[in-house]
Amino acid sequence: MEALHAFRKGLNTVLNSACALIFAAMVAIGTYQIVTRFIFRSPSTVSEELLTYSFTWMALLATAYVFGKMDHMRMGFMADKFSEAGRKILSIIAEILIMLLAGSVMIYGGFSIMKLTMTQSTASLGIPMGVVYTIIPISGILIVIYSVLNIIDLATGYAKAPGGETEA
């Protein structure tokens, strides 16, 4: 059990760091874009494209991170009417549904769109669009991994349903 918690902690650290690095890069690129546009009167299309794609990557990685911390939004008006055991079962069912959705849409669909767009290039960067879309199956895989970890934590009592506060 401790190995799973160490794995989750390591994965959280990697995702947290990746999101912070992408955000820092976005700040630098955004500053460059503002300087080139308003001071030098020569807008950079490369920086605009980089900002768009890096924002997408950061958003999807942050989504996986939030699922891993079990801090995602929920509508508790129905779940709060259940007993603690009922909330735990409801949380496990929700995690299974999330896993199915991430697996079918993000992983399977992400790989499909990735393969389909490998021959298309981005307008300014000239890289294959499939490379940009790799974040979809990557974040899907991360969400599935986190869902499995969440189910294990819920089943063993390490995490409380539905808020995700840990006991340890």
Image (spheres, grey):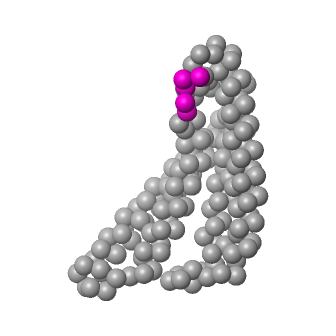
List x then y, in percent, for residue 94: 68, 33
Q: Is residue 95 above or below residue 56?
A: above
Task: Classify residue 108 by image quadrant.
Answer: bottom right
User: Can residue 6 be seen at all in this image of the molecule?
Assistant: yes
Which residue does the image show at 74% across and 64% down from the upper left? 111
Q: Which sits in the foreground, 93 or 77? A: 77
Seen as rendered, the residue at the extreme front is: 78
Q: Is residue 43 above or below residue 72?
A: below
List x then y, in percent, for residue 11: 61, 47
Which residue does the image show at 68% across and 52% down from the upper left? 140
Which residue does the image show at 69% across and 55% down from the upper left? 106
List x then y, in percent, for residue 19: 49, 55
Task: Classify residue 155 by image quadrant.
Answer: top right
List x then y, in percent, for residue 161: 61, 24
Q: How many discs mark residues in the rendered view? A: 0
Q: Is residue 80 magenta?
A: no
Magenta residues, dominant SS class: helix
Quarter of the image with the C terminus in it: top right
Q: Would residue 28 appear left or right of 94 to someone viewing this image?
A: left
Quarter of the image with the N terminus in it: top right
Seen as rendered, the residue at the extreme left is: 39
**Magenta residues, start to end:** 74-78
User: Can residue 166 be seen at all in this image of the molecule?
Assistant: no
Q: Is residue 97 above or below residue 113?
A: above
Q: Is residue 77 magenta?
A: yes
Which residue does the image show at 42% across and 81% down from the upper left? 45
